[in-house]
Amino acid sequence: MSAHTLIEAIQQHGSSGTSIEPASTPVPMWMGSPDGWKLMLHGNAFVANTQQQADSPRNRDAFFSTNWFMPMAQHALGSRGQITLRAMFSLEPATISNRNYPELFQQGETAYGAPIVDGQHPHDFFMEVAALYDLKLSPNALLSFYAAPVGDPAIGPTAYPHRLSASEDPIAALGHHQMDSTHIAFSVLTGGFTYRWVRLELSGFHGAEPTEARWHFAPSPNGHAIDSVSTRLTVSPTPDWSGQYSIAHIVSPEALYPGEDQQRQTASVMYHHTFRSKPMPPMNPKQMPPMKMDDMDDMDMGGSSGQKPSSSNSMSTMQMTPEPTTDLSSTLIWGRTRSLSDNSKENSYLAEALLRFASRNYVWTRMENAGRSNELELTPGTPLPEGFVESPIGHVAAYTFGYDHDFPIGPHLLMAPGSQFTVYRTPAALRSIYGSTPTAEQFFIRFRVR
């Protein structure tokens, strides 16, 4: 399932929060339409083993699972409105032991009260609980509202678990906490206005990151009140391109540094293109979402010419939505976090790409240059020393390459065994701890709802 315009992509709501990928990006899901509702289910799970090689005791191997699933329901509300109810859950609090899985040079949040060093924390069981309302003001204008006790404010690009270019990689990007870590935040309210291919959004939210109580809504020391703000500008001039710039003032995000507020800026560009596709068999009419004639009038089903086909041709086009056999998705991201206490800055840069070919084969790469702090000099699992002051220490380069292959194991489920390899380049200040070029491998089986 994919869209044709920015407005269609927004109304589809196939990602977390109100984040958007290029309209042409396919969104794998199960769909049904009972009693005027459109029901959808997304889901992704990795069962993985990671092995690390560094010239130090920092090596840590583990067996773990990263996963999430997202049920969603949509219904018309008024003549031009649509309401979407969405939840997202993760079993990572149970499938990741020791409150983090191994990942060299990764840092952010805490485990057992100590800073996580060389590891990635699990997501909360409640990743998102949200309601969205879209009001079509005209064929080219859309007013949108988002409310979530836990959700994703308007900061950054689509978070790494949900963007297509990262969909086959089982572990987090090193720059996660400079780019998209706010994808789980509390007390989120967002308003947005879209005209043709431009959207502007404003969010209020609670700035503190989730606590280690991953199974339920656990308040930070500051409670859950809205205390932070962000704004994001999104442009999508063609179905294959999307870009965003966002800036946020975040109040006391880190539990270990409660008096430190941050400013975060991100900019990103995403590209998706289908090079070859094959027709799908006609959809079962009972599974097709109900559509009114004015809905069809608002959709551009006529390709680049912009001409609208007749209603009979529109229905035929919808039933024969092509399935990609070769498509490319890529993402470029810059993220910067600046401490408002001492003006220290950490910049991270990411380039990733995923090529799907022959329908079921995937190859991908992720290349990063991620700003790191002196927390990496600490012994993993130990509390912060008294008087410790966090400060930037250098940039880690990471180069990842991977492959997997889909096997259908049911009418709505795919399984893909795969592996990936990462080589790191250590900054000079950390070479006595890690060596110059540590490496890591992940071997996994990925499951996906389709």
Image: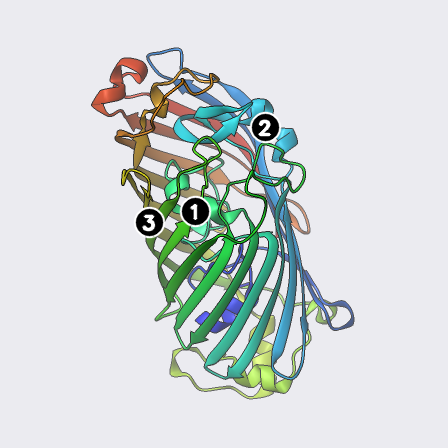
Residue 210, image quadrant? top right
Earlier-in-chain disc, 1 versus 3: 1
Q: Residues within 10 Å of mark 3 (few under 14, many from 20)?
A: many
Q: Could you tell whether 290 is left or right of 158 in the image?
A: right
Q: Quadrant of the N terminus?
A: bottom right
Which residue: 49% across, 84% down? 139
Spatial CA span between label 3 and label 2:
27 Å
Q: Position of residue 349 (x, y in %)?
A: 29, 43
Of all residues, the one furthest to the left in this rendering is 428
Q: Amino acid at mark 2?
A: Ile
Name the residue at the right extreme: 35
Please provide percent x and percent y for residue 276.
Answer: 42, 60
Dot 3: what SS? strand
| Residue 7 vertical placement versus 176 (above, below) | below
Task: Specify few, some or many for label 2: CA neighbours under 10 Å numbering under 14, 14-19, or 20 or more.
Answer: many
Q: Amino acid at mark 1?
A: Asp
Q: Which residue is mark 1?
A: 180
State the mark number for residue 333.
3
Which disc, if any, is residue 92?
A: none
CA–CA distance between discs 1 and 3? 10 Å
Mark 1 → mark 2, Cα distance in angstroms: 21 Å
- Nearer the observer: mark 1 or 3; the answer is 1
Residue 366, horizontal then vertical, whole percent: 35, 40
Q: Decide: is 380 above or below 141.
A: above
Q: Position of residue 151 (x, y in %)?
A: 56, 52
Against 445, residue 273 (above or below) is: below
- Name the residue nearer the viewer: 297 or 156: 156
Mark 3 or mark 2: whose residue is earlier in sequence = 2
Residue at numbered disc 2? 96
